[in-house]
Image: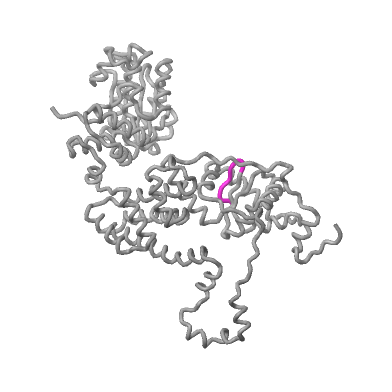
Amino acid sequence: MAKAALYQKYRSATFEEVVGQEYVVRSIKNAVRSGKVGHAYLFCGPRGTGKTTMARLLAKSVNCTDPEHAPCGTCENCVAAINGTHPDIVEINAANETHVEDIRDLIERSRLAPMMGRHKIYIIDEVHQLSSAASSALLKTLEEPPENVIFVLATTDPQKLLPTIISRCQRFDFSKVKKTQISAHLLSIADKENIHMEEDAAEMIAILSDGGMRDALSIMDQCASYTGDQITLEAIDQIYGLTTTREKIDLIKNILNNDLEQILKQTASYEERGIDLQRFTDGMIDILKDTVIWQNTHKAELMKLLNVEEANEISELADSDVCMHIAETVLKGKERFKTATSPVSAFEVICFSLASEKKRQQAVTVVREAPAATVRQETYRPAEPERVTAKPVYTEPAPAVQEEKKIPEVKKAPAEHVVEKINSIRIIELLVQCSKAQKVKDEQAFAAMKNMMSLEGRKYISLLQDTYIGASGEDCIVLITKAQAIANRINDPVMNRELYQFTKTQLNTDKVIFAITEQDFREASALFRIMMRDNSLPEAYKVNKYKEDEVHEDTPEDKVIALFGKENVEIIGG
């Protein structure tokens, strides 16, 4: 007799055994306990997340003779359902029985009274594959269902269903199972099956399964056969053509160090080993995301792949802006793999482009970080001195040359006016609370501001005219601008309070304004999408509005200075 697959052997037999889908389990369980089961259910979600399992549990429970503990697994109805011999539980696969004749036959049989239990249950899997005529025939029955008949429809593609069918069902959306839940479940099964499995191996299988428990158990089954019940991370890498986190970190470091030779060696190795570059780039993005999270929060528990030493290793070579740029470039480059004749060559081009770009930016970084004298020397010293002496600009008298070498003293703003740049994590915390409806509302208010001719508000209108709204929430507006200087001016505490008062009184918008550059917005948006995909978005940032006594009111002198400029105004008297 053939050995039963793990996903068949360990299919959940009770509601308590279902992994994940907590809200679905609770809803169905309560409906059964209270005797308020509906006549039609629609289970939607990715493959392998428990839709068919939940349909079978519902079918067993409604006919169980012990509703308080349904499904009990011991009564006559439960035993027949487990053995697949219950006459009142009918499963059909719409992928095979798509014609209208099949559905009409099902409808005719559904009008007959139950033979063994209290209800007849029809489970229709992949219901979106029904033909148009079959869907229309099913619709009529769902609208006027026979007594004691329950339909359970399951699909991975609900948008292909008729909206009228969806509206007649209680819809439950199944989400991908969390990686931690999959990993814990695999380790539990490994103990029962006497399989030695490393925790890292269980985590890797959870990643490969992409939220599907059935896929995870199938991968575990395959690995156990290959390794002789000794599942290690190295074995999984060999089977599925994966690379270690260390290899990905090394490639990122080679890109940051512009080491084209090592990049070529690594990519050649990936080609020889048949590495899946789609998964490899996903891993790179996750590593870069962890690095950005560490750089902005210094909380190790928020990282999924890296430890503190590895995060610091990358952080020594790149700040969060560079990491986000690389992640965004790699994410866009994944599309090339689908159309490229050689995916490896396409990947090499991406790596070379990033490495060359990093090299070009190194000079700028040196200039920014070096002392003022060094900056002047690196920036203005010509490459060929003999040519410089021929130019008139350098034949001026000695005093002028001496004056040229003198480094002008830069006046620094007072400490209280130094404005820190808003980091990516803070931007994401703001975006979490934003909505499209709020953005549309605020855009309309700001559009009206351009027509205002008030002298008192001219300086604010002038400051805001080179910005646009990127996102809006209940208590905040995120403004986008091309220049960091404008963002700094808007975020200056004094100006920000004044803008808050201006927009509150003139635009009836009681919100605090945050300004960022277009580049920062793009990078934060890319990280937002990655974190949303991984269900790791942070809590929304709590915006503290200015209190009335904190709001700065312009004095007449302030208004005159704003109009004519400080250098053109002399205040007489005091």
Q: Residue at x 51, y 63 (%)?
A: 369
Residue 134 at least partly seen: no
Give the left or right position of residue 454, taking residue 539 as reference: right
Q: Position of residue 94 (x, y in %)?
A: 29, 32
Residue 403 among those drawn in magenta: no
Q: Position of residue 454 (x, y in %)?
A: 75, 55
The N terminus appears in which quarter of the rendering? top left
The answer to which of 300 and 349 lies nearer the viewer is: 300
The answer to which of 201 and 431 lies nearer the viewer is: 201
Q: Position of residue 270 (x, y in %)?
A: 26, 54
Q: Residue at x 49, y 45 (%)?
A: 297
Q: Residue at x 34, y 31 (%)?
A: 154
The C terminus appears in which quarter of the rendering? bottom right
| Colouring scheme applied when the structure was drawn | one colour
The answer to which of 43 and 263 lies nearer the viewer is: 263
Q: Residue at x 56, y 41 (%)?
A: 541
Give the left or right position of residue 3, taking residue 105 as reference: left
* Number of numbered tags placed on the structure image: 0
Indicate the quadrant where residue 307 lies.
top left
The answer to which of 15 and 487 lies nearer the viewer is: 487
Q: Position of residue 75 (x, y in %)?
A: 28, 12
Indicate the quadrant where residue 129 lies.
top left
Q: From this viewpoint, which residue is outermost toward the right?
A: 573
Residue 471 among those drawn in magenta: yes
User: Is 470 above or below relative to 28?
Assistant: below
Give the left or right position of residue 105, taking residue 371 as reference: left
Give the left or right position of residue 322, taking residue 105 as reference: right
Indicate the quadrant where residue 252 lies.
bottom left
User: Is 433 above or below relative to 145?
Assistant: below
Bounds of the magenta span?
Answer: 469-475
Residue 228 at least partly seen: yes
